[in-house]
Image (cartoon, helix red, strand yellow):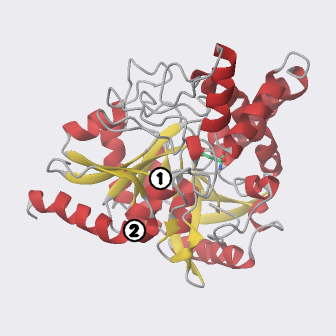
């Protein structure tokens, strides 16, 4: 209970655990007193390096606090470190970090998930009580599931992205990773709100804790039939079946609903997100931030800096995005993907006319061995259940629900846009 002890203890646990886990890219030994929190290293904290786990930002020190960080600091939180991620948040395992992979506290041979793997592992290992992540296609929820903690992606527009290094701006949202649903709700009350520095934020007064600890009326839950498709691990399917019986015991009604559109979400996302990447990452040119490899001419300088500074996965995305946005292919790919995105969103909204929530596993599989997935397409398919919420701007949470063997399983609960408090309340009840 001694406020000075919290940060001290957190720094001690980090010192001890992080030699193995590698959840942190940098640790703030001078952190002031307060509640220790970890911030994903694509979110600016003034005076500390923002690396995005990339070589291209080498030496870049943030000159301002992200809005979320400013809010946390002014409510008594203390940033004890910046957490590891896949480079520029592109990935689902934190293996694509130029600082090496984060290890899963439940099995150090396995990935922590990603891209916010450092944040999830740090919370799971008790290095911090809470952390922030960013979620473009599942990066808060999937690592939370792999590490057995809670991860919440808010409705698009509720949390300011000012100070978050942009990946795919129409999909990115910052959110909490915590041990309990209640903690996530408390953090949401602090970080949410309209921000003049992010024109996509909306004016909404929401008390995210309003349903925490409350008895909920009978809810209608749609379990997506796609949760039982091939590609979903047997053990994960069993956990979902257990979950269904569990919520039915609470008096809620559950039906299996065919949401066929889910199967188009990965293809749609992997056109839209890289397209936005190719535009957003053009700013890393060796002039404005971090790394510069000197060369004869300007063009050579760009090429060398970007060639050396970006990792393979980031380059792959930039190339895909450059292709999908090019004049000759724009209609065939980007424009079409935008249409499918709208269709997926419409389908989900239709389901919400009859049901309060849509439930799926957060990930079709549990945490896998480091280095065991090498095919990008296999890797991308892991995002199948998390991506729809980003495409439609919906709130979605991953709550731990037991284990397969020694590895945690997360269940995802998705609600209509701006039903964030209800999603948190329901998750709290079944936690
Ligand atoms: N795994 C997805 C990707 O690689 C999602 C990443 C994210 O949400 N930042 O793009």
For the N terminus, which image quadrant? bottom left
93 on left or right of 18: right
Which residue is situated farthest in the front direction here? 296
Residue 227 screen position, x and y as percent: 74, 63
The residue under label 2 is: 19
Residue 214 screen position, x and y as percent: 35, 59
The residue under label 1 is: 84
342 on left or right of 81: right
For the C terminus, which image quadrant? bottom left
Does the closest atom of ligand 1 sit within 8 Å of the Cβ of label 1? Answer: no
Residue placed at 91% from the left, 18% from the top?
Answer: 328
Task: Point out the frontmost of discs 2 and 1.
Answer: 2
> Is residue 189 something that shows in the picture?
yes
Q: Is residue 175 above or below residue 114?
A: above
> Is residue 209 something that shows in the picture?
no
Residue 332 screen position, x and y as percent: 91, 26
Question: Which mark sits nearer the N-terminus, 2 or 1?
Answer: 2
Q: Is residue 210 above or below residue 222?
A: above
Question: The residue tagged with tag 1: helix, strand or loop?
Answer: loop
Q: Nearer the viewer, residue 392 or 133?
A: 133
Residue 326 screen position, x and y as percent: 83, 20
| Cα–Cα span, label 2 and label 1 | 13 Å
Residue placed at 33% from the left, 68% from the top?
Answer: 126
Residue placed at 20% from the left, 65% from the top?
Answer: 9
Instruction: For the residues labelled 2 and 1, say whether their Cβ atoms are less than 8 Å apart.
Output: no
């Amino acid at each position: 209970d001694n406020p000075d002890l919290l940060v001290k203890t957190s720094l001690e646990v980090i010192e001890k655990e992080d030699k193995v886990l590698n959840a942190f890219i940098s640790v703030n030994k001078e952190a002031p007193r307060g509640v220790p929190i970890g911030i994903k290293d694509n979110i600016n904290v003034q005076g500390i390096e923002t690396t995005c786990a990339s070589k291209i930002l080498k030496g870049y020190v943030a000159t301002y606090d992200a809005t979320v960080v400013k809010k946390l600091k002014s409510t008594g939180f203390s940033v004890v470190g910046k957490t590891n991620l896949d480079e520029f948040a592109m990935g689902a395992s934190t293996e694509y970090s130029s600082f090496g992979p984060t290890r899963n506290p439940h099995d150090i041979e396995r990935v922590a998930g990603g891209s916010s793997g450092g944040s999830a592992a740090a919370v799971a290992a008790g290095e911090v009580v809470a952390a922030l992540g960013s979620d473009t296609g599942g990066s808060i929820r999937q690592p939370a599931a792999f590490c057995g903690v809670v991860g919440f992606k808010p409705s698009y527009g509720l949390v300011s992205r000012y100070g978050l290094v942009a990946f795919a701006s129409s999909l990115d949202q910052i959110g909490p990773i915590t041990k309990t649903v209640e903690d996530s709700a408390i953090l949401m009350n602090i970080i949410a709100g309209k921000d003049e520095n992010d024109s996509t934020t909306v004016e909404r007064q929401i008390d995210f804790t309003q349903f925490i600890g409350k008895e909920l009326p009978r809810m209608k839950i749609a379990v997506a039939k796609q949760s039982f498709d091939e590609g979903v691990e047997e053990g994960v399917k069993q956990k979902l079946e257990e979950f269904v019986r569990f919520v039915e015991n609470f008096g809620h009604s559950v039906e299996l609903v065919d949401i066929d559109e889910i199967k188009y979400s990965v293809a749609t996302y992997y056109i839209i997100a890289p397209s936005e990447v190719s535009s957003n990452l053009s700013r890393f040119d060796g002039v404005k931030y971090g790394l510069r490899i000197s060369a004869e001419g300007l063009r050579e300088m760009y090429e060398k800096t970007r060639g050396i500074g970006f990792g393979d996965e980031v380059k792959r995305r930039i190339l895909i995005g450059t292709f999908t946005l090019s004049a000759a292919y724009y209609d065939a790919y980007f424009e079409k993907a935008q249409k499918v995105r709208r269709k997926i969103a419409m389908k989900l909204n239709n389901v919400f006319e009859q049901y309060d929530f849509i439930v799926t596993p957060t990930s079709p599989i549990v945490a896998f061995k480091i280095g065991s997935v090498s095919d990008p397409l296999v890797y991308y398919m892991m995002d199948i259940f998390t991506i729809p919420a980003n495409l439609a701007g919906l709130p979605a949470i991953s709550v731990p629900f037991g284990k397969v063997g020694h590895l945690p399983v997360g269940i995802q609960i998705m609600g209509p846009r701006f039903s964030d408090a209800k999603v948190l309340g329901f998750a709290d009840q079944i936690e």
